[in-house]
Image (tube, rainbow, N blue to C red):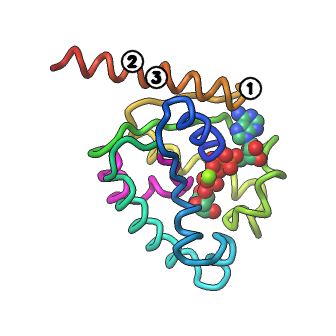
Amino acid sequence: MGVGKTTVGELLAQKLNRTFIDVDQEIEKDFGMSIPDIFTKHGEPFFRELEQAKTCELAQEPLRVLSLGGGAFLNESIQKTCLAHGIVIHLDIDWAEWTERMELLIDDRPLLQSKDLSDVQELFYKRQSAYAVNHARLLINKRTPEEVADALIDSLKQIWASSELRK
Ligand SMILES: Nc1ncnc2c1ncn2[C@@H]1O[C@H](COP(=O)(O)OP(=O)(O)O)[C@@H](O)[C@H]1O
Ligand SMILES: O=C(O)C1=C[C@@H](OP(=O)(O)O)[C@@H](O)[C@H](O)C1
Ligand SMILES: [Mg+2]
């Protein structure tokens, strides 16, 4: 959450000349409500159902850059669908660096509201095992979105080159 998936995903899509889709934005459009409002009015379990349905639908479409929500990969069917149909890259950030961003995030991220820093830190580390299931990981500390997008292109080139070798 807040690592830069939406920002960098859009830049990456421009550089690759592919369509960019942000799953949270699609849910907001479909449901006609912001993510914080969905959490407040319908609760997190309801949001997770919408997230599973929308992410699994969108992940099966080829030739797109898809940005997931930060909690999506905790869902087994989202994990399986994304890994089967796409290249999954984990954008990672160190806790210390992430805390510098937290103020920017609070208003739009319902999970950060009504939690103290130690609860958020626990959530941050608890999620790492789900994020470890991926095709590549990129640590973004101190890099600009532009630098992260370029590093993602390098990762993709390596993944494509090694899959060509296996053919
Ligand atoms: N590489 C970066 N360096 C500094 N700030 C960033 C970077 N990437 C994104 N941000 C900022 O961090 C916040 C969260 O970015 P966002 O793309 O919404 O992350 P996510 O989709 O992973 O939650 C935004 O305010 C964005 O401008
Ligand atoms: O980490 C999470 O559980 C969430 C992250 C958010 O997306 P970003 O990761 O794009 O902030 C959004 O899906 C929702 O607020 C829940
Ligand atoms: Mg996002």
Q: Is residue 1 visible?
A: no
Q: Amino acid at mark 2?
A: Gln
**Marked residue nearer the N-terminal end (1 or 2):** 1
Quadrant where the C terminus sits is top left
State yes or no: residue 79 in magenta.
yes
Q: CA distance from mark 1 to mark 2?
A: 23 Å
**Is residue 68 something that shows in the picture?**
yes
- The answer to whether residue 42 is left or right of residue 129 is right
Tell whether label 2 touches label 1 (CB within 8 Å). Answer: no
Residue 139 in the image: x percent, y percent? 59, 28
For label 2, the residue is 158
Q: Would you call the spot at circle 2 few (<14 residues within 10 Å), some (14-19), or many (20 or more)?
A: few
Question: Foreground residue, 71 or 154?
Answer: 154
Q: Any magenta on residue 112?
A: no
Residue type (three-letter) at the residue carrying disc 1: Lys
The CA span between labels 3 and 2 is 5 Å
Q: Secondary structure at mark 3?
A: helix
The answer to whether residue 144 is above or below residue 10 is above
Q: Quadrant of residue 88?
A: top left
Mark 3 highlights which residue?
155
Of mark 1 and mark 3, the one earlier in the sequence is 1
Q: Residue furthest front?
A: 17
The residue labelled by disc 1 is 142
Image x and y of residue 118, in percent = 73, 54
Residue located 44% across and 48% down the image: 130
Judged from the image, the secondary structure of the residue bearing numbered disc 1 is loop
Query: Callout 3: 10 Å neighbours few (<14), some, many (20+)?
Result: some
Which one is nearer the viewer's eye here, 5 or 32?
32
Relative depth, front residue between 46 and 131: 46
Magenta residue span: 66-83
